[in-house]
Image (cartoon, helix red, strand yellow):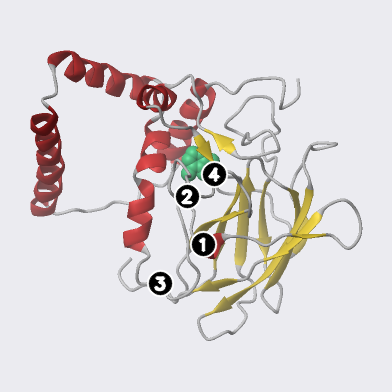
Amino acid sequence: MTATEYEAKAADSGAGATAQFLQKAGAKANTPPERVSELAWEVIHAVHDTIRKHKVTYPEYDALKAWLIQVGADGEWPLFLDVWLEHVVEEVANEHHKGNKGTIEGPYYVPDAPEFGARGTLPMREGEEGTPLTFSGQVRDLGGAPLAGAKVELWQADAAGYYSQFAPDIPEWNLRGSFTADDEGRFSIDTIRPAPYMIPTDGSCGKLIAAAGWHPWRPAHLHLKVSAPGHDLLTAQLYFPGDEHNGDDVAQAVKPELMLAPQPALEGPGEVVVYDFVLDPATEGR
Ligand code: MBD
Ligand code: FE
């Protein structure tokens, strides 16, 4: 079976994303009770206000209950939260940054991908579909000094819009890799152009989208984590000009600073693109 011959099921991607999230070494928030109370009450009161304002009925309340139960059963809490809430958490977390803009991580990052040094090709199947893309750049600090040895992790969907480890029948590390910038902070990665991503329609998030008359699309994107000792980790996504959904990403994670400018390759059928990263110094106390 090839990537285009199956339909990814919400159960595959949702359950995988939930398992992946639960494996993450749990960073403890240590939130004091006063803050827990304030945050919880504000959210609860906001829901009360919505119920009063729109005179929400018992059938609507029961439909909400059933839907919330089903989100958990589908394993779609990571998907729901990352699509509709994470972009604001990211905005607040990084508003002090002077270097590169970042954006949300989303539900499909997996740590410890294969390592390739400063230059290499992402793991791919034989005859991997998609336009070849050479993505290169330099990692620097705020003063413009190259960050030799910076780590550049890239993960992406394939040309059918599926992520390895979150859809069936794709090799484990397909289109996932970790690179180490050279003495000048430079790296170069051979990959393919990803396809736009569609939220699975058969799970709870898809049901919400259909019931509300929204669309399920994210524009095509490359996911990156760029890090260097003494600097804040940068989690970003890079986008392609002309994508139909750059202006209405369901996850609201597109920023103009994250738009690539691919050019036709000098040789061969593919494209080349250069994008540099500027990392902020490590934030105290985070
Ligand atoms: C994705 O590929 C993604 O990047 C986000 C943020 C949410 C769902 C799927
Ligand atoms: Fe993604």
Which tag, 3 or 1, sits closer to the chain's start? 3
* Distance in Å between CA atoms under marks 2 and 3: 17 Å
The C terminus, quarter of image: bottom left
Relative to the observer, which residue lies in front, 279 or 111?
279
**Residue 245: which disc?**
4
Which numbered mark, 3 or 1, is in the foreground of this view? 1
Rendered location of residue 43, percent (x, y) = 16, 42
Is the CB of mark 2 within 8 Å of ligand 1?
A: yes
Binning the other alpha carbons within 10 Å of mark 3 as few (below 14), some (14 to 19) or many (20 upward) gives some
Which quadrant of the structure image shows residue 162? top right
Residue at 33% across, 73% down: 284
* Distance in Å between CA atoms under marks 4 and 2: 18 Å
The residue wearing badge 1 is 256
Identify the element where label 2 is drawn.
Answer: loop
Whether residue 174 can be seen here: yes
The residue wearing badge 3 is 97
